[in-house]
Image (cartoon, grey):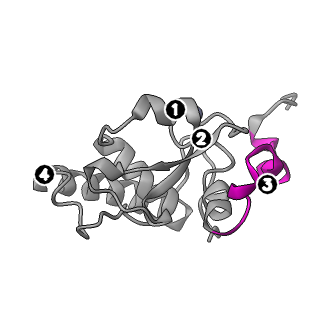
């Protein structure tokens, strides 16, 4: 009792106008929803600097479709540059989007080693099995019922 300033009370869908118009519909809107209106990288609320980040960079073979994209701040995207995300971020990508990212080659075998991919699957399964369909993000929000 007495907590009146919970970030959880933030109704992010009411604030979708805080991001550029081109990201307010379709696949981008669904990403916004599944990311709870926050940046995939820093998890602070998205704003007018919102960027479409190719999770596996295009320069590394990442696909141009939304199936390989998340929403980030411009500064976060720039900091990431063309680096390949680490395994925890790969697991997070699946938790947020419900799927593994895609490359032009199809799979992730050219990007990560077999051992890394097995580790990612193992971590994802562990989190998923612990939480069931109600898997939550780092702030305890449930992905259940989201598209
Ligand atoms: Zn950010």
Could you give the CA–CA distance between mark 3 and mark 2, rounded to whole angstroms?
Answer: 14 Å
Image quadrant of ligand 1 equals: top right
Q: Within 8 Å: ligand 1 and the Cβ of disc 2?
A: yes
Q: Where is residue 82 in the image (x, y as percent from the top left)?
A: 33, 39
Q: Position of residue 116 (x, y in %)?
A: 18, 49
Region rendered in magenta = 8-26
Q: Circle 2 is placed at which residue position?
A: 39
Could you give the CA–CA distance between mark 1 and mark 4, rounded to whole angstroms?
Answer: 26 Å
Task: Assess whether mark 4 and mark 1 are in contact (beta carbons under 8 angstroms).
Answer: no
Identify the residue shown where x is 33% and y is 42%. Answer: 85
Q: Earlier in the sequence, mark 1 or mark 4?
A: 1
Q: On the rendered structure, is 8 left or right of 56?
A: right
Q: Within 8 Å: ligand 1 and the Cβ of disc 1?
A: yes
Q: If the image is split into quadrants, where does the C terminus sit? A: bottom right
Q: Earlier in the sequence, mark 3 or mark 2?
A: 3
The mark closer to the camera, 1 or 2, is 1
From the viewer's side, name the closer residue of 147 and 29: 29
Look at the magenta stretch and give its main secondary structure.
helix
Q: Earlier in the sequence, mark 4 or mark 2?
A: 2
Reply yes or no: does residue 39 show up in magenta.
no
Q: Which of marks 3 and 1 is nearer the N terminus?
A: 3
Identify the residue shown where x is 18% and y is 57%. Answer: 118
Label 2 SS = loop
Q: Circle 3 is placed at which residue position?
A: 13
Task: Assess whether mark 2 and mark 1 are in contact (beta carbons under 8 angstroms).
Answer: yes
Could you give the CA–CA distance between mark 3 and mark 4, rounded to whole angstroms?
Answer: 38 Å
Specify the label residue 76 is tagged with: 1
Q: Circle 4 is placed at which residue position?
A: 113
Identify the residue shown where x is 59% and y is 41%. Answer: 39
Q: Which of marks 1 and 2 is nearer the N terminus?
A: 2
């Amino acid at each position: 009792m007495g907590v009146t300033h919970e970030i959880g009370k933030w109704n992010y869908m009411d604030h979708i106008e805080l991001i550029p118009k081109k990201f307010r519909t379709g696949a981008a809107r669904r990403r916004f929803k599944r990311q709870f209106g926050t940046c995939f990288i820093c998890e602070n609320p998205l704003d007018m600097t919102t960027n479409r980040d190719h999770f596996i960079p295009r320069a590394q073979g990442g696909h141009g479709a939304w199936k390989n994209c998340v929403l980030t701040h411009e500064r976060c995207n720039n900091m990431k540059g063309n680096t390949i995300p680490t395994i925890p971020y790969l697991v997070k990508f699946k938790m947020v989007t419900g799927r593994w990212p895609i490359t032009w080659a199809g799979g992730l075998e050219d990007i990560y080693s077999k051992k890394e991919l097995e580790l990612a699957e193992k971590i994802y399964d562990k989190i998923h099995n612990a939480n069931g369909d109600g898997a939550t993000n780092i702030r305890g929000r449930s992905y259940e019922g989201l598209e």
